[in-house]
Amino acid sequence: MKRKSLVLLLVMMLMSTFTLYGCGGAGNTTQSSTQETSQETAQQGEKKAPAKVDIFQNKSEFAEQLEAAAKLYMEENPEVQINIETVQGADYATALKAKMLNDDKPEIFGIAMVGVKEDYGDYQEDLSDQPWVEHLYPDIKETVTVDGKVLGLPVSIEGYGLAYNREVFEAAGIDCSTLTSYDAIDKAFATLQQKIDNGELKDKYPQLEAVVEYAAKEAFISGLHLMNIPLQAELKTAKAAFEAQEIELTHADSLKALIDLQTNYTPARNNKSLLNSVDYSTQVGGGLAIERVAVIQQGNWIAPELANVAPDVLEKIDVMPIPLKGVVEDSIAVGVSFNWCVNNQASDADKAAAKDFLNWLFQSEKGKQIVIEELKCIPAFDNYEDLDRLDPYSKRVAEYMGQGKTMPWVFSGYPKGFEPQAAADIQGYFAGDMTWEECVQKLKEDWKTLR
């Protein structure tokens, strides 16, 4: 978010906490948890009515941590049964649609853009009277307000760029402070790849085989996040994207340059069709986490996984810009990927429990600690004081925000189906099925047809 109000609030808040101010996951797996407890709580003076809260969400990167948080809440509120189902990757939208057609609809569900009629607008409870609303950053609040009603809780401010292992670059003699433009990054990648190929880093990083890993198999990486970079420069806002009947792709040349930057230094650089089989797990857990590669296009949502499998590597993670050559080169993309909505057709008891759980998680002292330390979220609220507890990646995202070096997310305004189709188009380009010019034309045609 680049709006002044958000930046000023972030700067003021972070100056008091640390000196330096600065659709997730992939694959097609489903995780679910049902936690039960019969413990009594001494904090409740009167017995509350039994309530059920089903949460249907897509943040697989903190699914286990969210389940643990729900268990803690149920220990304090034994009359409430919380069930969490997490569907990750491109299957989420389809799974949510099926879920909302069932009689047993979730009490809390996640969506990218609130208020859109076809995106469950009829199911979104007015949350304007909730205690957390007054603490939303103004620019963030604007994104979840429709006709004067706050319809969703922003789960986390997120940012993505080129996540990299700073120590690998330093070992190659590269000054990381210079990585602020397309040309500088390209030059650094070339230098690092040459040293890898020459075996100069073999002793310190025995598994390091390439600079970058690019997971072209995942629709959200190419179709959602990569395409956002040129489209945010063309369309400016998610609302404008939602209203756009067609796109010009005025920055197609810069998009190709960005694709080249991320694929010319991969293990598949001599046969880019192989990128189409690289998935999220290979890129993150089997790539960056084990120091097989030094750079991936991902956001701060990878922090929980790195914290679990390679906490030492997480401490080395830094973020460089994701440069749109000649347009905007020293920024990362920042926004809110998902908002949790309360189903207004649930029973009164279940709705009350759903709202109380959201307040507990995002506003109680215990909940705030969980949000920052366990869920690894950058909170969308102005009353979090200990942001120095954020993981290294999230701190860097916050630093970019404080410096105003951000570009917006417009992908919540994409036509339905554009994400997987755009990814398929780019996969076709990697496979050699079409030229770049044909790929650009196909992307424009797909937008218009899907809209």
Image (tube, helix red, strand yellow):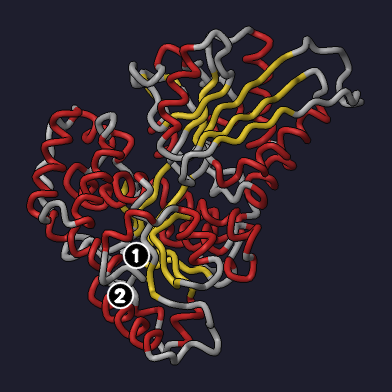
Depth check: give the residue in front, 399 or 97. 97
Which secondary structure, mark 1? loop
On residue 193, the disc is: none
Q: Compared to 89, does 203 lie above or below?
A: below
Q: Is residue 31 above or below residue 278?
A: above
Can you identify the residue that label 2 sits on? 185
Q: Residues within 10 Å of mark 2 (few under 14, many from 20)?
A: many
Q: Quadrant of the C terminus?
A: top left
Label 1, on which residue?
Answer: 321
Tell me where residue 138 sits by quadrant: top left
Q: Viewed as shown, does residue 236 lie left or right of 302? A: left
The CA span between labels 1 and 2 is 9 Å
Q: Position of residue 85 (x, y in %)?
A: 60, 30
Residue at image point 25% right, 51% down: 427
Q: Residue at x 22, y 61 (%)?
A: 324
Q: Position of residue 358 (x, y in %)?
A: 63, 29
For badge 2, the amino acid type reads Ile
Q: Earlier in the sequence, mark 1 or mark 2?
A: 2
Residue occupying image coordinates x 64% and y 8%: 348
Q: From the viewer's perspective, is the residue at label 1 or at label 2 nearer? A: 2
Quarter of the image where one finds residue 266 = bottom left
Around disc 1, counting alpha carbons within 10 Å, would you say few (fewer than 14), some (14 to 19), or many (20 or more)?
Answer: many
Question: In the image, what residue type sits under mark 1?
Answer: Pro
Secondary structure under badge 2? helix
Q: Which image quadrant is residue 251 in?
A: bottom left
Q: Is residue 4 visible?
A: no
Query: Do the residues under discs 1 and 2 have CB atoms within 8 angstroms?
Result: yes
